[in-house]
Image (cartoon, rainbow, N blue to C red):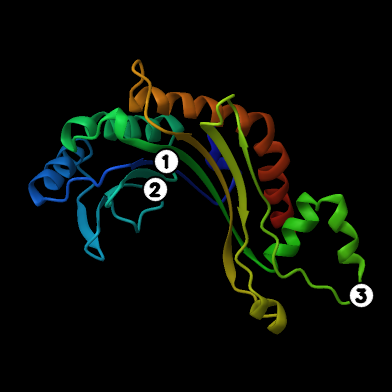
Amino acid sequence: MQHYGTFSDDFHVSVSLGTELELPNNRETLLHFFERIKKQYPSMRNFYTREKAEAILEEDKDQDSYRWASVDFKRIGTGYVNPPTLETAREQQSFVLELVPYALGVSPLDCETLNLIFGFHYLYRGNHNLLVAETLGLPPAFEGLLERPGVKVLANDPSITFAVDESCRLQCRLHIEPRTSAYHIRTGEFQEEQLSVFLTVRRFGSLDNDQTFVSVLEELYGIAGQIMDNHVIDQVLRPLQQAIAIK
């Protein structure tokens, strides 16, 4: 896989494991889980809770690049913002998933979803919705709408979800998220906001007997790599990067 961070201003890769049953929430279990992670990655030393439901361990966020891990009621997450290499992020995610069955008692039977998410973020001062329309185009049935006098694009967040297996348990979603509101367009006052592109590869349901969380993660990385290299880089990321640079 290429180092995808070169195609946007910021890049993050994260993994989340959703469970059917609620996760343990006693302090001893949670602290043991996070202490194991901290032992492996000593710079992950910032520990806190959010709204008494989510526990988070992370590196200093004032750095350009940092790791994080979290546990919520029915979700375990871990990610890396601007990783030096994709393999570095994958090693961290595999380590956390290896801990999950032993430290938190999560069985492969208890898997609701396992998600791999690539996020690409561009800083752009202007109408994100119009930029996406002009750069990536619109469905042919919509193109004529922009030819009407005085038309302003207020929302344009293309999204597609598709399955890559017969059972539809392996699904991918490509989604573009502009952050321009009607207020910005009405006043003409545009702040420098993040325009984001997300690729999510998701596996639904309990794992098969010969699978582990780590082996499924490897499968998700393989699928994501093919979609990125065969479509997303040249058809989405490069055009957006070049259009923003010109403007």
- Residue at figure coordinates x 70%, y 55% from the top left: 245
Q: In terms of sequence position, does the residue under pointer 1 or pointer 2 come before the other?
A: 2
Residue corresponding to mark 1: 83
Label placed on residue 226: none
**Tags 1 and 2 in contact by the CB under 8 Å rule?**
yes
Q: Assess disc 1: are there few (<14), some (14-19) or many (≥20) residues with their C-alpha within 10 Å of its C-alpha.
A: many
Asked if one can make out residue 1 in the rendered structure from this viewpoint, the answer is no
Residue 233 picture quarter: top right
Instruction: Choose between 242 and 180: the one closer to the eye.
Output: 180
Q: Nearer the viewer, mark 3 or mark 2?
A: 3
Instruction: Choose between 241 and 74: the one closer to the eye.
Output: 74
Q: In terms of sequence position, does the residue under pointer 3 or pointer 2 come before the other?
A: 2
Instruction: Choose between 149 and 202: the one closer to the eye.
Output: 202
> Exactly how many numbered labels are in the figure?
3
- Residue at figure coordinates x 60%, y 66% from the top left: 179
| Distance from Cα at disc 3 to Cα at disc 1 | 45 Å
Question: Dividing the image into 4 quarters, which one contains the C terminus?
Answer: bottom right
Question: Dividing the image into 4 quarters, which one contains the N terminus?
Answer: top right
Looking at the picture, which amino acid does disc 2 mark? Ser
Q: In terms of sequence position, does the residue under pointer 3 or pointer 1 come before the other?
A: 1
Looking at the picture, which amino acid does disc 1 mark? Pro
Residue corresponding to mark 3: 149
| Distance from Cα at disc 1 to Cα at disc 2 | 6 Å
| Residue 166 image point, x, y percent | 59, 24
Residue corresponding to mark 2: 65
Residue at disc 2, secondary structure: loop
